[in-house]
Amino acid sequence: MKNIIIIILASQFLAKGNDIGKKITLDKLEIVAEDSVKNPKIMGGGILMFPIEISFTRKSQVNFTAPIIVTGTGMLLISSSMKRAQTDWYKEKIKGKSTMVDDYLAIAPNALALGLSIIGAKPKHKFKDRLLVAAMANSMSLGLTYGLKYTTKIKRPDNSDNYSFPSAHTAFAFAGAQIMHEEYGEQSIIYSILGYGIGATVGGLRMVNNAHWLSDVVAGAGIGMLSTKLAYRLLPWAQKKMYKNENLAILPVYYPKGAGFGMTLSFK
């Protein structure tokens, strides 16, 4: 068993003070909030700083370590100094330029994950399974993203609203990028590089458009990756519910300047 100790910033929406010492288990992944900081500091936007211990074994079929670390890094980047540096960079380098490319490019990884098989790429799962994973991943991603937006209420760089953290565009793009990696990555690393590259470009353009802070896009990337990992973990259960009972429906979801997948499940 390996143990990795990291310092992470988690919003009160994710972890409250009374959760210290409790365990959260996802398959073989175990997260323990250790009470080793006697006086946790509350920072801007209702952020609680505390160390967590991530324990995992090699037997785990789904490794959540990377997306959790990426999400945690995004939370660590929430600071006044980082925001000042980005504001100076925007004023000096970008000077009010903007683009709408990110609105369309965010859809590309999901579209490629579903459609690359048409040009001869060999995915691990059939189309209906990839569609099911995409629906679950993006539904969870958007749910986590907007839950945090309305909880942290961090102001955007352009001061347009208080729903900056994290970036939904970036989360959506990285959810699709992770599907590309899971389905085609073993066939060729090019597919993984392409997916993650598009996701990183979307995040960069969100900053160019002065719509998000660096912390927003990094955390959004982690949430997108984590949601896809969870979707693959839930895939066997979802297959039984959808293919046997036919109680699950996948529908397109549209939100301001973006799109995704929605999923409804009825129980008898």
Image (cartoon, rainbow, N blue to C red):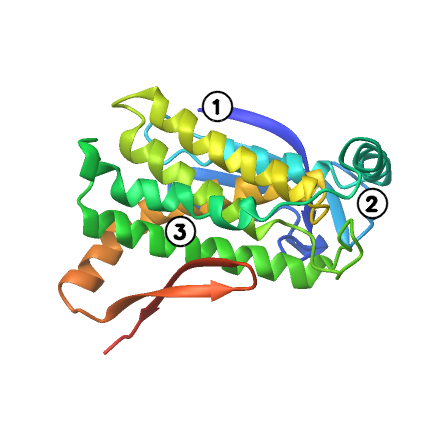
Q: How far apart are marks 1 and 3 (CA)?
A: 27 Å
Q: Position of residue 176 (x, y in %)?
A: 40, 43
Q: Is mark 1 on a helix, strand or loop?
A: strand
Mark 1, Cα crowd under 10 Å, few <14 / some 14-19 / many 20+, is: few
Q: Which residue is drawn at 44% across and 47% down?
A: 227
What's the residue at 76%, 41% (across, down)? 78
Quadrant where the C terminus is found in the figure: bottom left
Name the kind of residue labelled 1 in the image.
Lys
- Residue 182 appears at what percent x and percent y? 32, 34
List the residue tagged with mark 1. 2
Cα–Cα gap, marks 1 and 2: 28 Å
**Mark found first going from the N terminus, 1 or 2:** 1
Residue 243 position by quadrant: bottom left
- Asked if the residue under mark 2 is in contact with the one under mark 1, i.e. CB atoms within 8 Å, the reply is no
Please say if 88 is above or below 242: above
- To which residue does mark 3 refer? 137
Q: Residue at 69% of width from left, 40% of height from top?
A: 208
Q: Which amino acid does label 3 sit on?
A: Ala
Occupied quadrant, residue 8: top right
The residue drawn where x is 48% and y is 39% is 30
- Numbered disc in front, either 1 or 2: 2
Q: Position of residue 265 (x, y in %)?
A: 31, 70
Q: Which circle's residue, 3 or 2, is located before the other in the chain? A: 2
Of the two numbered discs 1 and 3 on the same chain, state the one appearing first in sequence: 1
